[in-house]
Amino acid sequence: MQLLSIIILLTLTVVIHSLWMFCVLKFINLEVDSAVRVVLRNVGIVISMIFAHLLEAGLFAAFYFVIDAFKDWNTSFYFSLVSYATVGYGDVTLPQHWQLIGGLEGLVGALMVGWSVAVLVAVLQRLRGMST
């Protein structure tokens, strides 16, 4: 059951992140007409990136909440965000029969953060190519 759950969660996470990446690369204006616009564009990208990660962690939190791993939504989201960000405080833990998913969420989070950095670098490289 854990394997099927992680495959579904991973697939949905990749879909969310793919849609975020598509929107950033398709709709962000790369014109280099002022430093203020460049900074505002970068701030917008980072804010949208954070919201994508919060949505992805929320997906895992919803799973934890639905399977009754935690008594309330706040605990589910807290555990998910701590796991997704690979902080892993350990003050809240999953029931033993679901612990594998918590560890895998950390791997998924690390991959998604790396992907986000790659998208940001791609945007910054396009900017550099347009400014020369």
Image (cartoon, rainbow, N blue to C red):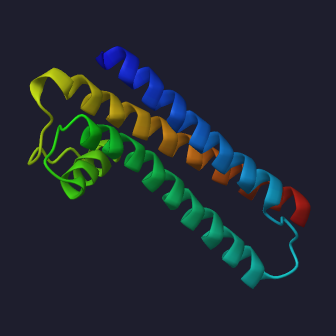
Residue at 11% x, 25% y is 96
- Image location (x, y in percent) of residue 22: 74, 47
Residue 124 image offset from top left, x and y in percent: 73, 58
At 17% from the left and 37% from the top, the residue drawn is: 69
Q: How many labels does the image show?
A: 0
Where 38 falls versus 5 (above or below)?
A: below
Q: What x and y, as percent, mark residue 23?
A: 73, 53
Residue visible at 41% across and 40% down? 109
In front of the other: 65 or 117: 65
**In this rendering, is residue 90 above or below 107?**
below
Q: Could one spot residue 132 in this view of the protein? A: no
Regarding residue 42, the answer to whether it shows in the image is yes
Quadrant in the rendering for residue 105: top left
| Residue plotted at (36% across, 40% down) | 60
46 in relation to 35, above or below: above
Image side of residue 46 versus residue 41, left or right: left
- Left or right of 36 in this view: 130: right
Query: Would residue 46 appear left or right of 60 to someone viewing this image?
Result: right
Residue 127: % across, % down: 81, 61
* Residue closer to the observer: 56 or 129: 56
3 up-or-down from 125: above or below: above
Q: Which quadrant is the C terminus positioned in?
A: bottom right
In which quadrant is the N terminus drawn? Answer: top left
